[in-house]
Image: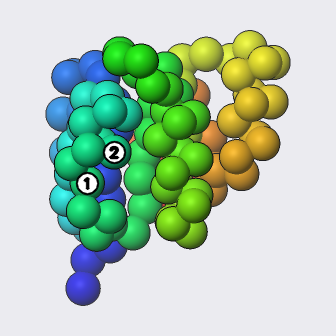
Amino acid sequence: MLIKVIIIEDELFIILHLSKLVKSLGFDVVGKYHNAEDFLKDTDWNFDIALVDIFLSGTLTGFDAAIEIKKRQKPFVFLTANKDTETINNAAKLAPAAYLNKPFQHSEVEAAL
């Protein structure tokens, strides 16, 4: 049985790239969301791990999505282009399985999953 992955990312190119990459690694992409609001409204929580961009379009952030994912004891990986201390410290408080900086490498995604 394939590990089920969801992607929460507001940039279409990154969603397409990540989706293709995750599938090539032998995982099943079971959901793609452009913002945290859609994820929280539409998810059935039937996934094993989430790839979550920290700064999303919409009112809610990836931090908000991660808090809900963590409540359900599911692992998540943060994705971000932001490398500032405040962002990294706030991300660390939520204890992600991994933290990937954009642009990420194929091997980094593979290691995180």
Q: Secondary structure at mark 1?
A: loop
> Within 10 angstroms of label 1, few (less than 14), some, or many (20 or more) residues?
some
- Vertically, is 50 above or below 8? below
Residue 73 place in picture, x, y as percent: 56, 68
The residue lying at 31 percent from left, 52 percent from top is 6
Q: Look at mark 1 in the image and give the residue it sits on.
A: 43
Which residue corresponds to mark 2?
A: 40
Kind of residue sitting beneath label 2? Leu
Q: Is residue 57 above or below residue 40?
A: above
Q: Position of residue 78 (x, y in %)?
A: 55, 39
Q: From mark 2 to mark 1, how far is it between C-alphas? A: 6 Å
Question: 10 Å neighbourhood of mark 2: few (<14), some, or many (≥20)?
Answer: some
- Pointers 2 and 1 in contact (C-beta within 8 Å): yes
Can the viewer see residue 87 in this picture?
yes
Q: In the figure, residue 12 lies in which quadrant?
A: top left
Left of 26 or right of it: where is 80?
A: right
Q: Amino acid at mark 1?
A: Thr
Q: Residue at x 28, y 20 (%)?
A: 11
Q: Which mark is residue 85?
A: none
